[in-house]
Image: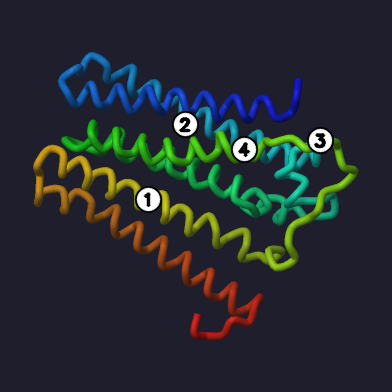
Amino acid sequence: MSPNLPGDLLIFLAFIFNLVVGVLFFLIARGKTSLEDLAKRSYHVIALCIALAVAYLYFLFFSHSFIIKYVYDYSDRSLPFFYILSAFWGGQEGTYLLWLFFNVLLGYILLYRGSQYRNYAMVVFSSVNLFFLLILLKLSPFALMKFTPPDGAGLNPLLQDPWMVIHPPVIFVGYAMAAIPFSIAMAALIINDYSLWVKKVFPWVAVTAIMLAGGNILGGYWAYKTLGWGGYW
């Protein structure tokens, strides 16, 4: 079996079930409440597919499967454990998968605590996830090389820093969290609620702001320490 097949199949299945979830929650919002269990189970399938895709990409990194272009581009055999860990988000493809992974996990907030906004919010949220899934179908982190190199190209020396392990996950949790208040706000517009939704989203806006501020502070220190950009950053 080609080593790219499991990863690409998981992304494709997540794409299909994401469409299903969006359609089902739209129908539930229109009164088809009997579809609720199916919609929730379909969302669980998306979460499982993305989690497995993340696990599989890590397996490819740690097994030095350099026939996978993304693994070749951002790692090599001499790379220490923590930098292999952070090589996952060393390029665009892995970064989009990481962002989607956090999106899907945080989507459970809407699924179980979305109250009267849940159904339309899940439709909007599915549209957000659809964007990332379309990118990953086109720009797959599991794309193959034409041959198997003996070693990888390695991680950019500027990225071989402890802050590379910490900063990107923190900031991408903030990015992913921003989709929660956004989805609730869009749902509130759809159901003509122009005031009550503000109280509902406030905690998630606060968490988003904290994570983004923390991520920017970490990124600023990293840039100052590694690149010498200056305190103005």
Pick whichever of labels 4 and 3 is earlier in the sequence: 4
Residue 92 pos. (x, y %): 59, 50
Could you tell me how far apart the alpha carbons at marks 1 and 3 are, in whole angstroms? 38 Å
Name the side, left or right, on which 55 lies relative to 48. right
Query: Dot 1 corresponds to which residue?
Result: 177
Pick whichever of labels 1 and 2 is earlier in the sequence: 2
Q: Amino acid at mark 3?
A: Lys
Could you tell me how far apart the alpha carbons at marks 4 and 1 are, in whole angstroms? 24 Å
Neighbours of disc 4 within 10 Å: few (<14), some (14-19), many (20+): many
Return the residue nearer the eye: 91 or 49: 91
Nearer the observer: mark 4 or 2; the answer is 4
Query: Dot 4 corresponds to which residue?
Result: 140
Q: Secondary structure at mark 1?
A: helix
Q: Amino acid at mark 1?
A: Met
Q: Which mark is residue 146?
A: 3
Residue 154, image quadrant: bottom right
